[in-house]
Image: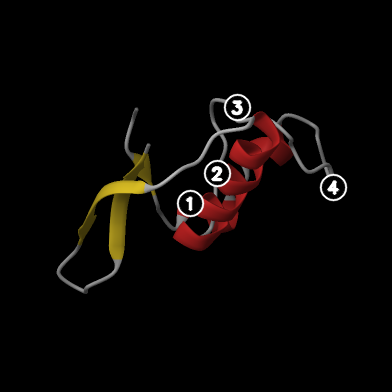
């Protein structure tokens, strides 16, 4: 699985809206999805996993100098 980066870009550029899916909550993971927080990512993937019949957990994560999560890996 790839690391899921978190950045300020999510606040100004939402990949889902750029593709013309305004106000539509995606039901499957899509390349280019952007999340504003780690909690949003975990909630989205937890709900997706429940629908598909499997679980998720955080395998690893890394915090920056400011103690904010910079990336994490869900498995």
Q: Residue furthest bottom?
A: 66
Residue 40 occupies quadrant: bottom right
Mark 3 highlights which residue?
30
Q: Secondary structure at mark 3?
A: loop
Residues packed near mark 2 inside 10 Å, few (<14), some (14 to 19) or many (20 plus)? many
Is 62 left, or right, of 9 in this rendering?
A: left
At 73% from the left and 35% from the top, the residue drawn is 27
Mark 2 highlights which residue?
34
Nearer the viewer's eye, disc 3 or disc 1?
3
Mark 1 highlights which residue?
9
Which of the marked residues, 4 or 3, is nearer the chain's N terminus?
Answer: 4
Residues packed near mark 1 inside 10 Å, few (<14), some (14 to 19) or many (20 plus)? few
Mark 4 highlights which residue?
23
Mark carried by residue 22 = none
Which of the marked residues, 4 or 1, is nearer the chain's N terminus?
Answer: 1
Is 3 left, or right, of 16 in this rendering?
A: left
Residue 53 occupies quadrant: top right
At 19% from the left and 63% from the top, the residue drawn is 64
Q: Residue furthest right?
A: 23
Q: Position of residue 66 (x, y in %)?
A: 21, 74
Which of the marked residues, 3 or 1, is nearer the chain's N terminus?
Answer: 1
Q: Secondary structure at mark 4?
A: loop
Inter-mark Cα distance, 4 to 3: 16 Å
Q: Quadrant of the C terminus?
A: top left
Is 7 placed above or below 55 here? below
Is 40 left, or right, of 9 in this rendering?
A: right
Inter-mark Cα distance, 4 to 2: 14 Å
Inter-mark Cα distance, 2 to 3: 10 Å
At 53% from the left and 58% from the top, the residue drawn is 36
Is 7 placed above or below 17 here? below
């Amino acid at each position: 699985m790839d690391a899921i980066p978190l950045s300020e870009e999510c606040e100004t550029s939402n990949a889902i809206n750029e593709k013309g899916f305004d106000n539509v909550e995606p039901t499957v993971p899509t390349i280019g999805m952007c999340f504003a927080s780690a909690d949003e990512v975990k909630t989205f993937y937890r709900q997706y996993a429940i629908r598909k019949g499997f679980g998720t957990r955080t395998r690893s994560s890394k915090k920056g100098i400011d103690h904010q999560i910079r990336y994490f890996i869900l498995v």
